[in-house]
Image: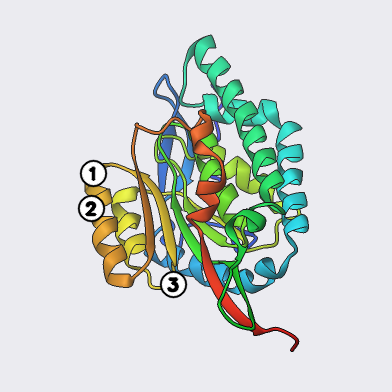
Amino acid sequence: MPRLPIIKTPKVLVGGAFIRSESGRVFPLRSGAGAAVANIPQCTRKDLRNAVELAAKAGPGWARRTPYNRGQILYRIGEMLESRVAEMTDALCWTRRGSAGRAAAAQEVSQTIDRLVHYAGWADKYEQLLGSVNPVAGPFFNFTVTEPMGVVGLIAPAEAQLLGLVSLIAPAVVSGNTVVALASEQNPYPAIVLGELLATSDVPGGVVNLLTGFQRELVPSFATHAHLRAITAVVGPDHARTLGLGAAESVKRLKVLPAGDVDFGDNAAQGLSWIRALVECKTTWHPIGA
């Protein structure tokens, strides 16, 4: 009698712990050949609410970390991913076929490592460029400094399942924010492997929370959740409209990138502008001589 294969049912990383969906639902992840290879948790609005609460609790401690320390931690994630290139390449290949698909997956892992190192380097530099000492006509010092926004919602692209996700996470966490991210629907398994890596890294629990599920169920909750202070999303026009209406109602910063039009392998997907979008500027006055 042939052996019955056991399909893996992984968990998602929320608050530093691995959880199943609150509903207990899963959906099958199928290989490029159509075979079921994993049962992925189908997260709900309640999972999103729980993740936001845990991210909010982790926020103050993470924001107090020195930029140098945040850069060290981000660099360490890159180091750990470097040691798991083969495993992550396999995860990306579950929905791809042929040698060309594997070569593209290996390149995406390499670019992801480079992206982490890139933002690790920005950790102690962005403040010098975004902050300033402002000239005033009086006996005062006037400073503009940046502050993290708080909990940031991220909706990853379908195409670059690892590189796109990390390209959204890195600028958010390096500037002191905590994140709740929805992984790619097409292949969420690289996000699950990333969660396993983060759980054994120096990232404090709750700083990065990863959900899997369907955009049609979770995008409306992302849009209207009052404790999400900003959202960066790679979505189609219908979901972009939902996010726009919800963000206006709940007064949050919104950056929508059209699905399929963003090349995350390009240098345009990195840099100071991605950090600037997720910080707030505070101006303070101080008397000279006080």
Label 3 vs label 1: CA separation?
24 Å
Q: Which residue is mark 1?
A: 237
In the rendered image, the vertical position of residue 121 relative to residue 151, given as above or below:
above
Amino acid on which the number 3 mark rests in the picture:
His
Q: Secondary structure at mark 1?
A: helix
Residue 219 percent coordinates (x, y): 33, 55
Q: Label 1 crowding class (10 Å Cα cut-off): few <14, some 14-19, many 20+?
A: few
- For image coordinates 49% across by 61% down, the residue present is 152
Q: Which residue is mark 3?
A: 227
Q: Secondary structure at mark 2?
A: helix
Label number found at residue 241: 2
Q: How many numbered circles are shown?
A: 3
Label number found at residue 221: none
Toward the top, the furthest residue is 99
In the rendered image, the vertical position of residue 267 relative to residue 58, given as above or below:
above
Residue 118 shows in the view? yes
